[in-house]
Image (cartoon, rainbow, N blue to C red):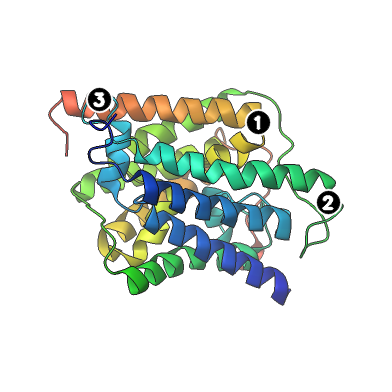
């Protein structure tokens, strides 16, 4: 298990560093991108473009790999249906993203940059996730919480 | 062109983006998983039992602020203008948390990992949250709630 944990830690650290380097840890810059009809700041488009390049290559490599380097198998999303949950959830996410200028990655990385406001957002975000788990209408096909966490 | 890029950081954006994409590629090719931050955060905190083994989710989530701290250490303070008040942070956080679980992903899972896989679900999700993000900021500005 140690080697997979090292992979995850390196990936998370590089991801967080990338967010900090790219200006995405700055909510005003993200809101600047979303301010399409105002003083639009295209930085986020460069970040997204930059991020898509290694991943497009990675997906091509993945097709030829029987197994990942440090896991027994690939565990990848298989859902194909464009259901109301997907679209409603994404629509809500965009609203919250616009209100705060934060999405999950920059908010968690931001704990190291602006701890107090980032923590306020992260705690509220986790509360929103818990709320989703508690609402039976919102969740399907989600097993119960781990016994150790109750 | 110069006007549009007046306040932008295209070079840093591109470099940071390449780092984010490489990190996602490490998750995919190393661990066979999607680097979706909302899902990994829910898994790390035990809010869900779906997804990656919990130690991996915890390691990834701890890495995020670690990486940001490393950049601060190496290059000096990172700009983070939190001009919105606590109310906007709380409302935004609640809606982002609920929405990302309902929609099975956020900017990283759908935006970076899903779009590069040409997943129809992720393309639709990313288009949707971009549009509602644009509309939300425009509406807030129109209502005088701009920050």
- Image location (x, y in percent) of residue B54: 64, 64
Foreground label between 3 and 2: 2
Residue B68, relative to residue B139: is it above or below?
below
Residue extending furthest toward the left: B144
Chain ID, mark 2: A
Chain ID, mark 1: B
The circle on residue B93 is none
Q: Residue at x 44, y 47 (%)?
A: B14
Residue extending furthest toward the bottom: A2
Q: Residue at x 35, y 67 (%)?
A: A112
- Image location (x, y in percent) of residue B5: 28, 36
Please tell me whether mark 3 sits on a helix, a strand or a loop. helix
Badge 1 crowding class, 10 Å Cα cut-off, few under 14, some 14 to 19, many 20 or more, is few
Chain ID, mark 3: B
Labelled pair 2, 1 in contact (Cβ < 8 Å): no
Q: Is residue B147 left or right of residue B76?
A: left
Residue under pointer 2: A65
Please tell me whether mark 1 sits on a helix, a strand or a loop. loop
Please tell me whether mark 2 sits on a helix, a strand or a loop. loop
Residue under pointer 1: B118
């Amino acid at each position: 298990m140690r080697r997979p944990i090292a992979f995850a830690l390196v990936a998370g650290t590089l991801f967080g560093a990338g967010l900090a380097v790219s200006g995405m840890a700055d909510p005003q810059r993200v809101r600047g991108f979303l301010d399409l009809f105002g003083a639009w700041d295209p930085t986020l488009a460069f970040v997204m473009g930059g991020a898509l390049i290694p991943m497009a290559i990675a997906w091509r490599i993945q097709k030829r790999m029987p197994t990942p380097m440090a896991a027994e198998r690939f565990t990848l999303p298989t859902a194909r249906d464009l259901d109301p949950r997907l679209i409603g959830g994404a629509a809500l996410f965009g609203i919250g993203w616009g209100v705060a200028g934060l999405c999950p990655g920059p908010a968690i990385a931001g704990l190291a940059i602006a701890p107090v406001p980032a923590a306020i957002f992260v705690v509220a975000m986790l509360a929103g996730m818990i709320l989703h788990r508690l609402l039976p209408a919102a969740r399907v096909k989600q097993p119960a919480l781990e016994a150790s966490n109750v | 062109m110069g006007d549009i890029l007046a306040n932008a950081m295209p070079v840093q954006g591109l470099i940071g983006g390449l780092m984010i994409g490489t990190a996602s590629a490490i998750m995919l090719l190393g661990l066979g998983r999607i680097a979706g931050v909302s899902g990994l955060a829910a898994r790390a905190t035990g809010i869900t039992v779906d997804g990656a083994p919990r130690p991996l989710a915890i390691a990834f989530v701890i890495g995020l602020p670690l990486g940001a701290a490393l950049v601060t250490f190496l290059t000096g303070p990172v700009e983070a203008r939190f001009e919105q008040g606590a109310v906007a942070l709380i409302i935004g956080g609640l809606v982002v948390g609920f929405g990302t679980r309902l929609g099975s992903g956020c900017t990283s899972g759908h935006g970076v990992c899903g779009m590069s896989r040409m997943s129809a679900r992720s393309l639709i999700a990313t288009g949707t949250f971009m549009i509602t993000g644009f509309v939300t900021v425009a509406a807030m500005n129109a209502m005088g709630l701009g920050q």
